[in-house]
Amino acid sequence: MYNAKAYAANSATSPLASATIPRRDPTEHDVQIQILFCGICHSDLHTVRNEWESAMPTVYPCVPGHEIVGRVTRVGSAVKKFKPGDIAAVGCMVDSDRTCPECQAGFEQFCPNWTLTYNMPDKHTGRVTYGGYSESIVVDEHFVLRVPSNLDLAGAAPLLCAGITTYSPLRHWGVTKGKKVGVVGLGGLGHMGVKFAHALGAHVVVFTTSPNKRDDAFRLCADDVVVSRDANEMRKHAGSFDFILDCVSAEHDVNAYLQLLRRDGNLTLVGAPEKPLAVSAFSLLMGRRSLSGSPIGGIAETQEMLDFCGARNITSDVEVIPMQQVNEAYGRLLKSDVKYRFSIDMASLT
Ligand SMILES: NC(=O)c1ccc[n+]([C@@H]2O[C@H](COP(=O)([O-])OP(=O)(O)OC[C@H]3O[C@@H](n4cnc5c(N)ncnc54)[C@H](OP(=O)(O)O)[C@@H]3O)[C@@H](O)[C@H]2O)c1
Ligand SMILES: [Zn+2]
Ligand SMILES: [Zn+2]
């Protein structure tokens, strides 16, 4: 074991502050990474503040961060994919059992024995896993991704969660040219959803509560923008969408969006608000509509998404901040004031 510098929260109400955490020395299949950039996902905030207590209570101290890009510093003797000096990335998972049917099918995100990058029991240290708000991390090579060399690293980090979480359901639900797709909530996930839906050829409509994001939505290649608090604007789109991706982090009326789906249309929740959403049966009965959810994506699909981004030069629009501004950034996330992902420059930690 060795000590690494990090930023941690000690309770649901305390700000993140400088801390030291133990990391394991790389075992034979491990890759040790010096973290260069780590994105700030709203899930980091939900976890730090224990807002998901009923599903996954937070263990303190908590070191969040699962949008990690860095440079390989050491590798174990059996590691084949990476060597010191390579650029590498880590997303929301650092382990799974590799043997269950889901793992064998490449769906590690559905493994009953997965290990998330933070706030999960860590079989190596006996504590919980600590995420990317840290100077380094040690991860089994199966869960380490390659970053296309043309991508800006600060903007590539958010692809590891916001990217795969939006890419995976868009692909699963067959979004292609000719489909009308809605993206609800123009934050970290939402702005990646717009980029991917556009790149896949769909007609993309952004739903936002922030009228001041209208110009940005068009710049991100939306075909239309609806300010969702305007009932008239909403009505114009009734019964017209093939697919809607709901990326909202807080309580909202999902029925207002279900009504915009055409027959057999689907709304997928990727946003994970603290409180349950109320769904009217009629919103689903009419038009035989369906409501689903989707968690991140498997390792193979995450690599596919990164390669897709490399081929099209897609990255996240980031505001790069030093580690010391993380608490301020959380405050801005809660006000929907993010354009469109914070990416922490980890050089600020050392
Ligand atoms: N499924 C998964 O695997 C997965 C992965 C990552 C994150 N998540 C979850 O996805 C959600 C979004 O994450 P994120 O990092 O993209 O968050 P974010 O950057 O904070 O964006 C959330 C957006 O939701 C909209 N919004 C916020 N409060 C709202 C309210 N009260 N009513 C309506 N709209 C509201 C805002 O967009 P406008 O200003 O445009 O309205 C805001 O920018 C979080 O709950 C996060 O935990 C899930
Ligand atoms: Zn995330
Ligand atoms: Zn498994």
Image: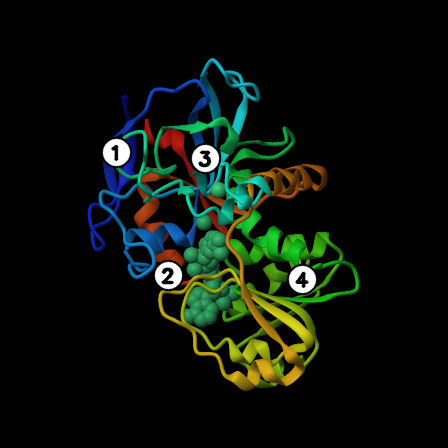
262 on left or right of 245:
right
According to the image, label 1 marks what residue? 126
Q: Is mark 2 within 8 Å of ligand 1?
A: yes
Tags 4 and 3 in contact by the CB under 8 Å rule?
no
State the mark number for residue 334.
2
According to the image, label 4 marks what residue? 222
Q: Nearer the viewer, residue 287 or 259?
A: 287
In this rendering, the label closer to the viewer, 1 or 2: 1
Q: Is mark 1 within 8 Å of ligand 3?
A: no
Give the residue furthest to the right.
178
Q: Secondary structure at mark 3?
A: strand
| Spatial separation of the CA atoms under disc 1 and disc 2 | 33 Å
According to the image, label 3 marks what residue? 37
User: Nearer the N terminus, badge 4 or badge 3?
Assistant: 3
| Spatial separation of the CA atoms under disc 2 and disc 4 | 24 Å
Query: Can residue 29 be seen by looking at this rendering?
Result: yes
Q: Position of residue 129 (x, y in %)?
A: 33, 38
User: Nearer the N terminus, badge 2 or badge 3?
Assistant: 3
User: Nearer the N terminus, badge 1 or badge 4?
Assistant: 1
Q: Position of residue 112 (x, y in %)?
A: 43, 48
Identify the colour scheme used.
rainbow
